[in-house]
Amino acid sequence: MWEKVKTHISSSEGVFFVFVKWVLIGGIIGLIVGLVGISFHWLLEKATEFRMDHPGIQWLLPIGGLAIIGSYHILGMQNDRGTNFILVAVRQNKAVSLKTAPLIFFSTIVTHLFGGSAGREGAALQLGGSLASFFGRIIKLNEKDERIITMCGMAAGFSALFGTPITAVIFSMEVISVGIMHYSAIVPGTIAAFVAAALAQRMGFLPTAYALYGVPDVLSYRVAISVAVLGILCALVSMLFCITMNKVFQFYSLHIKNQYVRIFVGGAVLIGLTFLLGCNDYNGAGMHIIQKAIQGEAKPEAFLLKIILTAITLGAGFKGGEIVPTFFVGATLGCVFGPILGLSPSFAAGLGMTAVFCGVTNCPIASFVLCIELFGAKGIIYYALCCGISYMLSGYYGLYSEQKIMYSKVKPEFIDRSVE
């Protein structure tokens, strides 16, 4: 009996030591990545403001592209795989080069400054993962702990930029291998995300949140059917987004092998399309268009054009993220089709925004939590239904080719396959 008590005490002391270690590490990562992420956020906003005030700067996009490729070549990172390598780093314990952080920092700002159609959260995942991985090597963490600290960095980076700390933690654990979550990262990840988000708020960057109108007050079978149909549409658009991204990248790689020529041509094509469209709605992340969609205003073709321009931008070699463009696509899709289905355009924009995100990332739990952080808990059963349907029917497509789907979407069966 006494031996069992001593074993329990010894085990408890070990767990407490690990707890203290990760509280400290999580706090440090949240501080470091948070400060860098806040600077990144501020510069992105300034770059966006400057571009919108001086739209003529977009004519320099091809030149900006050459600067991006040149910087990666100078630092020997011409074969950088972006967010995909962060996923591999966690799953296989690959070291993430510290060079990734300044490169993605610089290149994403250049992309936004000159009008490339890209987001920012994907860049934040790379930024946070790179810094955290480097810190883990400095303090000589073992192989398993290095995986945890990389996820902490991902969570802190996402949280600092978007202000949704719980989503950031869940997403960093869920996106690596769908169906298997490393719960060992939940405490340090939560602390890192909290510290980063709190710093951002102290610096005046309020968390992203939207006030939707037309959210049903009571449960309704008619509304549930309409939401389900919208979920099916979101699944189809999710697949279209992923297929388009993949096909455009393959086209570039096959027909324009020189990276400098590729990004210059891609920038020129993007400028031409912007000129033909006669507006700048699809340049940059498009957060203002998302806001308009939430308010009930969106062009019918907006979701499709954003997919095309984002694929042209990122496929050519410009840097940024894919997550905000998916929000753009989902919000405008929902706003347009919601009224046809008998839903409020604002409510449908919120549904579409999170359901398309779910479809392209294969992260239903993170998407469900994202709904609560962005819109509140009212109508949450409808968000869960829409996201769940989008996840199930979007097949095994995904934005990140290195993402693993560990279990089937339609049966309790281990499949361990990469996304298409």
Image (cartoon, rainbow, N blue to C red):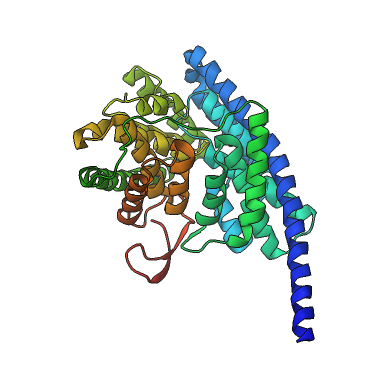
Picture coordinates of residue 280, whole percent (x, y):
40, 20
In this view, 9 is above or below 167? below
Is residue 155 at all visible to an observer of this figure?
yes
| Number of dots carrying numbers | 0
Picture coordinates of residue 141, whole percent (x, y):
75, 60
In this view, 176 is above or below 72? below
User: Looking at the image, which is closer to me, 68 or 371?
Assistant: 371
Picture coordinates of residue 290, whole percent (x, y):
40, 29
User: Looking at the image, which is closer to me, 75 or 313?
Assistant: 313
Is residue 98 at all visible to an observer of this figure?
no
**Residue 335 placement, left or right of 17:** left
User: Looking at the image, which is closer to me, 213 or 262?
Assistant: 213
User: Looking at the image, which is closer to me, 258 or 240?
Assistant: 240
**Residue 181 placement, left or right of 344:** right
In this view, 146 is above or below 65? below
Picture coordinates of residue 302, whole percent (x, y):
32, 29
Q: Residue at x 40, y 48 (%)?
A: 358
**Residue 290 placement, left or right of 131:** left
Find residue 255 and report its image quarter: top left
Q: Residue at x 75, y 63 (%)?
A: 16
In this view, 367 is above or below 44? below
Which quadrant is the C terminus positioned in? bottom left
Which quadrant is the N terminus positioned in? bottom right
Find residue 335 and report its image quarter: top left
